[in-house]
Amino acid sequence: MAGFKFFSVPKPRGFHYKPIYYDEHKEEMRLREERIRKEMGLTDKDKPFVPTIRGTFQNARRTKRSASKQSNIRLLIIIIILLLISYFVFYR
């Protein structure tokens, strides 16, 4: 009974997590380079362009139309070739 304390709240245990693959020097260098680029007014050309949602829908519609046109042209060419083959087979 000596181990129970009814009126005292236990202190929380500390949490000390150290990532396995963390390089502190590399992170400091990256932050320093970013700060210098911002001060000099340079932009990041490595970052990819993220289009807006409207542009994404327009590109999808344009791609669908061009695919549909290509499919229609291909179907028309196949029908013409089949008609020519059937003409030569039955009328010659």
Image: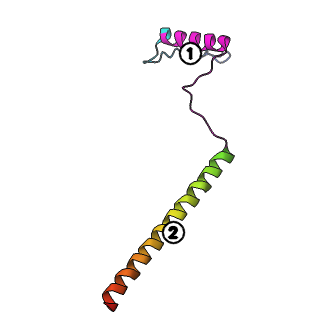
In the depicted structure, whether residue 61 falls above or below residue 48: below
Q: Quadrant of residue 34?
A: top right
Decide: few, some or many residues near mark 1? Use Cα within 10 Å; few <14, some 14-19, many ≥20: few
Residue 16: percent from left, percent from top: 52, 14
Crowding at dot 2, Cα within 10 Å, few <14 / some 14-19 / many 20+, comes out as few
Residue position marked by numbered label 1 in the rendering: 13
Residue extending furthest toward the bottom: 91
Nearest the viewer among 3 and 63 is 63
Residue sitting at 56 percent across and 28 percent down? 47
Where does label 2 land, which residue? Answer: 72
Q: Which of the two marks, 1 or 2, is nearer to us in this view?
A: 2
Labels 1 and 2: the sequence-earlier one:
1
Question: 67 or 90: which is nearer to us?
Answer: 90
User: Residue at the location (43% across, 77% down)?
Assistant: 80
Left/right placement of residue 19 relative to residue 60 reads left
Magenta span contains residue 24: no
Place residue 13 in its image quadrant: top right
Quadrant of the rendering where the N terminus is positioned: top right
If the image is split into quadrants, where does the C terminus sit?
bottom left
Question: Relative to residue 92, is residue 33 drawn left or right?
Answer: right
**50 or 22, which is in the foreground?**
50
Q: Magenta segment range?
A: 26-52
Please state the total of marks drawn on the protein image.
2
- What secondary structure is found at the residue carrying circle 2? helix
Query: Residue 63: x and y, percent?
Result: 56, 55
**Do callouts 1 and 2 mark residues in contact (Cβ within 8 Å)?**
no
Dot 1 amino acid type: Arg
Q: In x, y percent, where is residue 45?
A: 57, 25
Q: Residue furthest front?
A: 92
> Relative to residue 69, is residue 41 depicted above or below?
above
